[in-house]
Image (tube, rainbow, N blue to C red):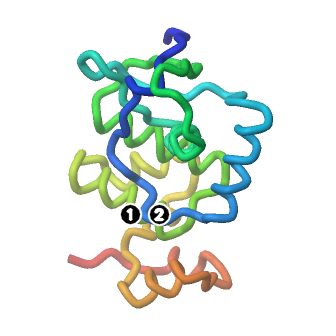
Amino acid sequence: MEFKLVELGSLNYGTKIRSSANERLFNELKASIRAKGIKFPLVAVKDGDKYMVIDGVRRLNACRDLGWNQREKLPVILVKADEGEAVETALIANTVRGNFSAVNMAEAVNLLVNKYKKSIAEMASSLGTSFCAPKLLLLKPVLACALSRGATLSGWSLICDWKIST
């Protein structure tokens, strides 16, 4: 791990794991960055002559929305990770902060299981959760749509009791 100041113009996005964002929270983040600057470093991996941000994409977007100069330097922690590990790191960081919707988590876990060949058990272990939470990826489209529009589940038992069938 290495700490570095990196020009805004050298930072790119990795695999997107958040399909929706809360505009009010994003505006609050921009106001905070406008007033105080970046207080927490982004996390990135080296990608040729650029850097792929794996944690801090919203902070990066906020700086760009605020019109920061491409030569402005942002604090970055550089880590070594392949693309699958980078996506997993981003998922863990978002989950720890608690600002990740059930639908976004399901989509990210689904990506890791299908594209990067992680098992649901591996994901549960990485997320520090029970085996049932990553089963959110089994959500039926109607339930996923309802959750993305603000509906909530009254309890995890609905998900935990589902059986995986092939």
In-front residue for pair 70/13:
70
In-front residue for pair 111/71:
71
Quarter residue 111 falls in = bottom left
Image position, residue 93 (x, y; %): 56, 41
Three-letter code for the amino acid on which mark 2 is drawn: Asn
Q: CA distance from mark 1 to mark 2?
A: 5 Å
Q: Is residue 122 left or right of residue 35?
A: left
Q: Secondary structure at mark 2?
A: helix
Image position, residue 42 (x, y; %): 55, 29
Three-letter code for the amino acid on which mark 1 is drawn: Glu
In-front residue for pair 62/58:
62
- Residue name at image x 68 percent, y 59 percent: 25
- Residue at the spot of label 1: 107
Verify CB contact (< 8 Å) between mark 1 and mark 2. yes
Q: Residues within 10 Å of mark 1 (few under 14, many from 20)?
A: many
Q: Is residue 90 left or right of residue 114?
A: right
Quarter residue 36 falls in = top right
Q: Is residue 46 left or right of residue 19?
A: left
Image position, residue 47 (x, y; %): 28, 22
- Residue name at image x 45 percent, y 57 percent: 18
Can you say whether 157 is above or below 59 in the image? below
Q: Secondary structure at mark 1?
A: helix
Q: Across the whole image, how many numbered discs are drawn on residues? A: 2
- Residue at the spot of label 2: 104
Image position, residue 132 (x, y; %): 50, 66
Question: Can you say which quadrant of the picture contains the C terminus?
Answer: bottom left
Q: Residues within 10 Å of mark 2 (few under 14, many from 20)?
A: many
**Residue pushed farthest right?**
35
Can you say whether 72 is above or below 145 in the image? above
